[in-house]
Image (spheres, rainbow, N blue to C red):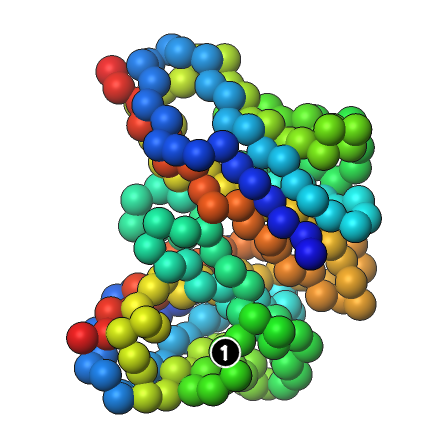
């Protein structure tokens, strides 16, 4: 079945460090790919998305490129801030007969120290 | 435009009681999805509904769980005779109908604690 595997956390970095969170997927077709972020006690917020191969999603300094050849969608940011501390979820989705189920990775907890 | 609303935000139940979780989708959205998040895990799909129809309930436990999305009013996720293992955060998401893969917008969740 379809699945998403994320880099295990927790990840702890210093402010202004470079961030990479790895995400790979297994799917029978060509899904859309998403990164969601969850701040403590809150719901998920969409961070960025890509709907086809070689698309690059970007938002708030975060980027991820849909790589079909490596089935990956790694999240990167050049200089992290304390406010980026949160749990990050990679997810995939297909549209099948009008239904769109998101399949999530297990999440990666990121802590940024000042 | 208000976001997805869920209530209550926190719910405490004793074993054997019923839990009712409500979700009001964003204005103009006709699709509602329910997900469950166990502690320190990712979200797992439970059910997908449109108005008055359950489209896909492949992620719902076979017993004690039910969901509805009536013509008027919020979507309801109902858990009968709760057990400790039902303790989790339950998230609702909504999206519009466009025929394309759409972003799902999530509510703040209901955190259920079963004593």
Q: Is residue B41 left or right of residue A73?
A: left
Give the vertical position of B53 relative to B2 (above or below).
below
Give the vertical position of B110 relative to A30 (above or below).
below
Report which residue position mark 1 lands on: B61
Q: Foreground residue, A61 or A69?
A: A69
**Which residue appears at 79% of the width and 50% of the height?**
A28
**Which residue appears at 64% of the width and 60% of the height?**
A101
Disc 1 secondary structure class:
loop
Chain on which label 1 sits: B
Position in image of residue B22 (x %, y %): 41, 75
Q: Is residue A63 visible?
A: yes
Report which quarter residue A88 is drawn in: top left
Position in image of residue B47 (x %, y %): 57, 72
- Crowding near the residue tagged with mark 1, few <14, some 14–19, many ≥20 C-alpha atoms within 10 Å: few
**Which residue appears at 63% of the width and 35% of the height?**
A24
Q: Quadrant of the C terminus of chain A?
A: top left
Position in image of residue A57 (x %, y %): 65, 30
Q: Foreground residue, B85 or A42?
A: B85
Q: Quadrant of the N terminus of chain A?
A: bottom right
Report which quarter residue A98 is drawn in: bottom right
Q: Is residue B11 visible?
A: no
Q: Foreground residue, A59 or A29?
A: A29
Give the vertical position of B108 relative to A76 (above or below).
below
Q: Is residue A30 left or right of residue B95?
A: right
Position in image of residue A75 (x %, y %): 56, 27
Give the vertical position of A78 relative to A93 (above or below).
above
């Amino acid at each position: 079945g379809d699945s998403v595997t994320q880099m295990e956390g927790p990840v702890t970095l210093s402010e202004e460090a470079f961030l990479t969170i790895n995400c790979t997927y297994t799917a029978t077709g060509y899904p859309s790919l998403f990164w969601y972020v969850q701040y403590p006690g809150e719901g998920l917020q969409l961070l960025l998305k890509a709907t086809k191969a070689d698309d690059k999603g970007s938002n708030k300094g975060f980027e991820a490129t849909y790589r079909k050849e490596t089935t990956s969608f790694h999240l990167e940011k050049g200089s992290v801030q304390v406010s980026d501390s949160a749990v990050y979820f990679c997810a995939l989705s297909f549209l099948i007969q009008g239904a769109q189920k998101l399949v999530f990775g297990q999440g990666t907890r990121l802590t940024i120290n000042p | 435009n208000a976001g997805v609303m869920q209530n209550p935000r926190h719910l405490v139940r004793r074993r054997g009681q019923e839990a009712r979780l409500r979700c009001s989708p964003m204005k103009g959205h006709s699709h509602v999805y329910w997900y469950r998040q166990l502690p320190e895990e990712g979200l797992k799909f439970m059910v997908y509904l449109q108005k008055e129809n359950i489209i896909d309930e492949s992620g719902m436990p076979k017993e004690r769980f039910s969901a509805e999305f009536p013509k008027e009013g919020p979507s309801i996720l109902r858990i009968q005779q709760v057990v400790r293992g039902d303790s989790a955060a339950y998230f609702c998401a909504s999206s519009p109908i466009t025929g394309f893969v759409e972003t799902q917008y999530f509510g703040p969740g209901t955190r259920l604690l079963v004593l």
